[in-house]
Amino acid sequence: MRGPRIFALLAVAMLVAVAVASGSQAARSPVAAAHTRQHAAGNSPTAHLKGIHKIKHIVIIMQENRSFDNYFGTYPHADGIPGLGGHSGTVPCLPQADSSAPCVKPFHDRYDMNIGGPYHLSNAIADIDGGKMDGFVGQQENFLSICGCGPSVPANDAMGYHTRKDIPNYWKYADDFVLQDHMFGAVPSWSLPSHLFLVSLWSAICKRHNHPKSCTNAPDTPVSPPPFGHPIYAWTDLTYLLHKHHVSWRYYYFNGNEPLCETDTTLSCAPHSGGAQSASIWYPLKWFDTVKKDHQAKDVRSINGLFSDAQKGKLPAVSWVVPNSLVSEHAKDTTVSLGQTYVTGVINTLMQSPDWKSTAIFLTWDDWSGLYDNAVPPQVDENGYGLRVPGLVISPYAKKGYIDHQVLSFDAYAKFIEDDFLGGKRLNPKTDGRSDPRPDVRENLRQLGNLIKDFNFNQKPRKPVILPVRPKTDLIKPSS
């Protein structure tokens, strides 16, 4: 296991180096200096804009596989685990697969690597158990008995939760900005459908390229991108509307050639062929027919471009950012601490960008990974919602220390983008020019809240909150 750990440390070093260098260079660059003079003179580029339109750059950072209760179940005043963290109610105790065994209560899990349980549609149904929310332990135990991956450490860690001491930066963002305690996955399923919903508000199987009517609903089993399959993503995604209305966008991922640096202070390292790549299921946008037809595939690019674009003050209007396997926080595969370091580096870089004063960062996790959550997902249509995940809003216009109790899903990101840049136009088969048979217009579902409530556009733009990329934590590192 030494090799993967070295790779992980190298990856973190690279990310820290880029974040630190981006911050210091941005402060010295002519572009940054010009923006600083402009702001000092009271001539802010957003001064003439009103409301939501003060946000000129939306950055959606999606990490992997965490439930809300796993990260924020004991956060004060949030809708967390009953009976813990000052929350009212009786502490839940969930049955094991062996009904004669004692039930399992939530516990503080200090381990940096977690296991969780299975997380396909059938597992979501079992976890929810008709609203009882009591299937997590049994599902994990059944999974471990057949996967050959051994017992979790500690046992039944589907019921584990982390605290401020474990993930201090994430809790600090909640303290200083907005925590969403009813952010539900768009679909009760795994990563690929979740990422498809993120960019297109649907997950489907299609028979013919460029024939959106050939697509049928597939909330759990869409065709995966290479190397697993050769997908036909013929339905309409959000970039189709963005391109049509001349709104810039980019999708940043790890292409496997990012430099792996050995120190925290230099960028002078060459690309390494062994660099960890983002899983293709995390960037399915690349294979959409609309993206190819509009010659936009070039805008699915290396995460190096995000650091460069932020430093230069050239962020696009809309960005999606996905991790690689080493920093994803994916239960079973990587550590919480590496993911927090990576995300902090990205957010620090965005905060130190000349674009900060007109930026909104939406941070979330793609699915629950079989980890316990007590909130029953609303049934909004035949596809969703999925189980609850953490959600954070970070922006100079975000309310400070605000807990958003609205019912939300990833569809709310698209709704915010459309309201900000597209005059409220929706991914609607009746109006967008590409008629696909999606079940409904998800942005318009009556249950869906509005992210605009997380902002105060009348307040003076908030200063950046630059956090240490390697904060002291209470986490116990893997032993091998």
Image (cartoon, grey):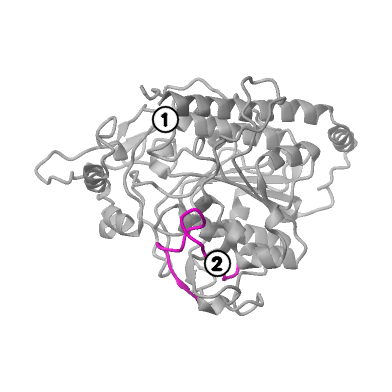
Element on which disc 2 rests = loop
Which x, y percent locates residue 279? 51, 47
Depicted 361 relative to depicted 108: above or below: below
402 displayed left or right of 348? left
The kind of residue on which mark 1 rests is Thr
Depicted 56 relative to depicted 22: above or below: below
Front position in the image: 429 or 172: 429
Which residue, given by chain and number where applicable, does mark 1 sit on?
Answer: 163
* Residue 226 visible at all: yes
Front position in the image: 139 or 392: 139
Magenta part of the protein: which range?
A: 215-236
Front position in the image: 89 or 298: 298
Which residue does the image show at 33% across and 44% down from the upper left?
Answer: 372
Which residue does the image show at 27% across and 44% down from the upper left?
Answer: 147
Examine the image and state in which quarter residue 23 appears: top right
Which label is found at residue 237?
none
Which residue, given by chain and number where applicable, does mark 2 sit on?
Answer: 233
Alpha carbon separation for disc pair 1 and 2 = 40 Å
